Image (cartoon, rainbow, N blue to C red):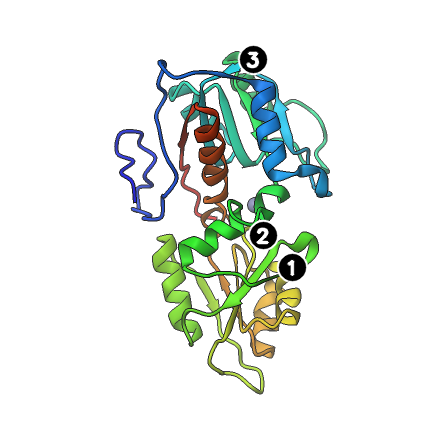
């Protein structure tokens, strides 16, 4: 674990899983072109392989030269303001600004976020499903690292689901481990189906709002499914099946991919990078 005291990106509740390099802006370092950075993200994450809910890549064009990248989970106003304070030239996030189904008007929160980005000439890069899916640096791979889980198979749409051997043999212990590792409480729904409770052998996970992947996780042979959110139907499904459900937070399960990718790309291209955690109870 590295100390993030100088850059201030250690979350307040003391999450201990930062392994990415974190380097506050350093004006003596080189800069790279916006195009070079976009190509590096694209070749790593291969957005052309995905049919997504919004555009992946450069969502808002800023300055042509980039020396410092701030990564974060969501392009919220709080993150943009923190990136301005950190003198970022580019922001790299999982949840960008533009999604299918929006009304397309630049009003309210959208106006405020865009105004901040444009006024400070900051580039916004956003990658959604490609960032969930990357086999080593993506949200799922990195959540697995944080939880000590290694996938030996994938499942579900776009192969976003990860599944592998369990690290605990009972669900409550696994749920407690997830809560400790992520620094927050989790929702644990124990299975009550005919064959439950059985020792857990296989754990499946898919970060964020992937409660809809529960049945695919059951079909993939999981004994427990970990994701960010739970909706009403999954509680019943878990109780009626032999498969437990852990909801550990959309934000909490998705804060590891963006810094892992941004740190790798920044390190390779010789620019600085820092992750900024904007706390989110959801
Ligand atoms: Zn998400």
Residue drawn at 56 percent across, 24 percent down: 37
Up the image or down, 102 lies above or below 64; here it is below
Q: Return the residue at label 1.
A: 212
Q: Is residue 167 visible?
A: yes
Q: Label 3 CB, ligand 1: below 8 Å?
A: no
Up the image or down, 103 lies above or below 279; here it is above
Disc 1 to disc 3, C-alpha distance? 40 Å
Q: Nearer the viewer, mark 3 or mark 2?
A: 3
- Quarter of the picture containing the N terminus is top left
Q: Return the residue at label 3.
A: 64
Up the image or down, 160 lies above or below 63; here it is below
Q: Nearer the viewer, mark 1 or mark 3?
A: 3
The circle on residue 181 is none
In this rendering, would 128 be left or right of 67? right
The one of 179 and 232 positioned closer to us in this rendering: 179
Badge 2: few (under 14), some or many (20 or more) residues near its Cα, within 10 Å? some
User: Contact, CB < 8 Å: mark 1 with mark 2?
Assistant: yes
Q: Return the residue at label 2.
A: 209
Label 3 sits on a secondary structure element that is loop
User: Contact, CB < 8 Å: mark 3 with mark 2?
Assistant: no
């Amino acid at each position: 674990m590295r100390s993030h005291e100088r850059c201030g990106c250690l979350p307040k509740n003391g999450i201990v899983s930062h392994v990415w390099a974190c380097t506050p802006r350093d004006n003596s370092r080189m800069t790279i072109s916006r195009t070079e950075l976009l190509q590096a993200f694209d070749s790593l994450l291969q957005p052309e392989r995905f049919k997504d809910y919004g555009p992946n890549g450069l969502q808002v064009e800023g300055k042509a030269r980039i020396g410092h990248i701030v990564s974060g989970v969501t392009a919220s106003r709080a993150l943009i303001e923190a990136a301005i304070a950190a003198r970022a030239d580019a922001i790299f996030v999982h949840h960008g600004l533009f999604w299918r189904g929006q009304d397309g008007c630049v009003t309210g929160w959208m106006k405020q976020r865009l105004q901040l980005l444009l006024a400070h000439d900051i580039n916004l890069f956003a990658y959604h499903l490609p960032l969930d899916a990357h086999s080593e640096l993506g949200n799922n791979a990195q959540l697995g690292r944080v939880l000590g889980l290694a996938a030996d198979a994938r499942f579900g749409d776009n192969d976003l689901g990860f599944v592998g051997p369990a690290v605990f043999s009972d669900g409550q212990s696994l749920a407690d481990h997830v809560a400790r590792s992520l620094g927050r409480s989790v929702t644990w729904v124990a299975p009550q189906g005919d064959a439950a409770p059985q020792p857990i052998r296989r754990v499946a996970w898919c970060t964020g709002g992937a409660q809809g992947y529960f049945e695919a996780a059951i079909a993939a042979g999981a004994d427990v499914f970990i994701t960010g959110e739970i909706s009403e139907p999954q509680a019943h499904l878990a109780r009626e099946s032999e498969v437990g459900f852990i909801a550990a937070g959309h934000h909490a399960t998705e804060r590891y991919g963006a810094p892992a990718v941004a740190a790798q790309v920044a390190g390779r291209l010789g620019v600085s990078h820092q992750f900024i955690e904007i706390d989110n109870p959801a």
